[in-house]
Image (cartoon, rainbow, N blue to C red):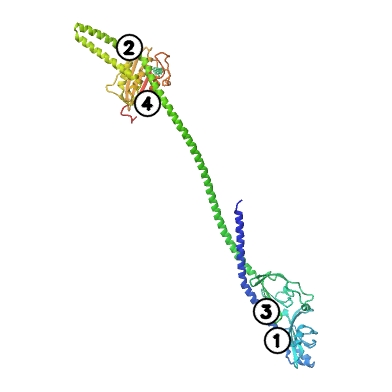
Amino acid sequence: MSRRPIAILLFILAVALLSGGVWWVSFTTALQPIADRGRADLSLAADRLVGELQRFRQVAVLLADHPDLAPLLAQGQGQARARSVLLRTSDKVGTLEILLADAEGAVLASSSDAPTASVTGQPHFQRAMQGAIGSYHTRLNETGQRVFSFAVPVFVGGEVAGAVIVDVDMEAVEESDWRGDPQAIYFTDEAGVVFVSNRSELLLRRQSGAGALPPAALGYLPSTLQPFFSHRALRIGDLELWFVDAGRYIPARALHFSQPLPVIGMTGEVLISTAQAERIAGLQAAFAAALSFAFGALLFLAAERRRALSEKLEIEARANAVLEARVEARTRELSDVNRSLRREIAEREEAEAALKKAQADLVQAGKLSALGKMSAGISHELNQPLMAIQNFAANAETFLERGNTEVAASNLARISDLARRMGRIIKNLRAFARQESEPISDVDIVSVVDAALEVAHARLHQLGVTVDWAPPPAPVKVRGGEVRLQQVVLNLVSNAADAMERAPEKRLLIELAREGGKVRLTVRDTGPGIDDPGKIFDPFYSTKEVGHSEGMGLGLSISYGLVQSFGGEIRGRNHPEGGAVFTVELTASGMEQVA
Ligand code: ADP
């Protein structure tokens, strides 16, 4: 399995963690200014509310000393005057009702047309009866109005004779003060009930977790107490984040601050939305995530590239390995082939050596065969001078007896000539029969032809062959071996003699021509011609009867090999006017480089 999905998952996890961290830090940082504003707003709102209520308290305190109220308490007189004071004051400061009650709680005068009947038992009144200023808040059952009341004692002759009670309509205070504020501000009483707020949803509701409702509060909240508004709290340092569920106009997530207001017996509280901080944190987290993803994408691309590269390298390495293996196999094959070639070469060399030996043997055999062919002629050739010598010697003897020394001397000279000639023939034969391997040198082909003709003379003479040979005056030097070349020429001459054995015209034509760096020897006869010119150089090809003239079919094939070994060429064909023509082309001496 690839590790890539895991890496991507881990990366996403890391980015999520990072952006989460960024979000949190940014969020908590952005909370500070919100908290500051919340605190400031709350203290401002609390100051306003307390200030406003204090204004009504002051009115109550001033009225308590009013000279027109004491007579009504003391003597029960001046009710109309007292009422007019209360009415005027109420109109001026904007209260719900101002009333004067006696020590028993019975209302003596009121600013209202439908005055409250009695304040007996009400906590602020009881407090006033003890000589202190009492305050109280409640909700009127008849109208549903929320009322905040102050009760200030009225002293007559140093005794508490009654109390001035100022009732304030809280809705009027709210409206004039901070209805339009963006944050939810509310004031809860000791029972935890929201009594004053700039959000009507919160009014007369209790926060969850505010504890059991004290029985005292039940007085003004019997049937109309709305359910709790729930919240969960989370502490962030010294801040308190509330998750509130109290309708759409109350922020769902808000910082909560509270401030006790002992002067009015309430606690001021504010819920300020954290939406702005969330927005900032969200933006910063998104930015961090985007940055991380961009960076990650770059990293991913780089890694992909590297991977692709290393894959490519791997493929190349694999290809290289395959190639190397192939090269190795091929090298092995080649060295095998090489070995077998070397073996073959050795075998060939052996075979060649054997062949050379066989060839040398054949040459010798060929020579002996030619000698055999000529032996009859040669014996005649030697016999003839011998007979002549015998005759000359006998004559010389006779002439000497007669004293004719001159003729005898000339006979002896003829004898010596004949002996020289016989010696030459024998020398040629000896040289011919000798198995020799003379090196290639410059040979006079004219003398070679002369020697061959001399050896073949007896046979040619016997057959009655006319030899047409005009040797050039100067030697013609060619490259070759003297004895071997003589063997070739002798072979051609004796083949011609064989061919013309029964021919009507017996003529042997020998010519020598020079052409460039070549010397061409032509031997032509007037015999019947060659039967199959394509085969004459094949070993053992012979048209001669077995036993006749010793035909073995080796003469021309041996001649072919010899001429080739001199760098020359031998050809045989039929002449257009009849008879066979053999040409031997040899390199002229001093022309080797040109040839
Ligand atoms: P051999 O003379 O022993 O037969 P050669 O190799 O010398 O062997 O000659 C081969 C053959 O070539 C001869 O048998 C003959 O048929 C042919 N041949 C050679 N020289 C001549 C020639 N001058 N005229 C006709 N045929 C020839």
Q: Secondary structure at mark 1?
A: helix
Q: Earlier in the sequence, mark 4 or mark 3?
A: 3
Where does ligand 1 appear, by image quarter? top left
Residue 500, quarter of the rendered image: top left
- The residue wearing badge 1 is 58
- 3D distance between C-alphas at marks 2 and 1: 190 Å
Q: Earlier in the sequence, mark 1 or mark 3?
A: 3
Which residue type does callout 4 highlight? Ser
- 3D distance between C-alphas at marks 4 and 3: 139 Å
Q: Position of residue 422 (x, y in %)?
A: 29, 15
- 3D distance between C-alphas at marks 1 and 3: 18 Å
- The residue wearing badge 4 is 565
Q: Is residue 304 visible?
A: yes
Near mark 4 (Cα within 10 A), the count class, few <14, some 14-19 or many ≥20, is few
Q: Earlier in the sequence, mark 4 or mark 1?
A: 1
- The residue wearing badge 3 is 46
Q: Where 381 sits versus 62, above or below?
A: above
Q: Earlier in the sequence, mark 2 or mark 1?
A: 1
Eye-nearest disc, 4 or 3 = 4
Which residue type does callout 1 highlight? Gln
Q: Earlier in the sequence, mark 3 or mark 2?
A: 3
- The residue wearing badge 2 is 380
Which residue type does callout 3 highlight? Ala
Which residue occupies the foreground of this view, 155 or 583? 155
Q: Residue at x 35, y 15 (%)?
A: 374
Q: Secondary structure at mark 3?
A: helix
Which residue occupies the foreground of this view, 407 or 591? 407
Q: Position of residue 16 (x, y in %)?
A: 62, 61
Q: Residue at x 74, y 74 (%)?
A: 211
Near mark 3 (Cα within 10 A), the count class, few <14, some 14-19 or many ≥20, is many
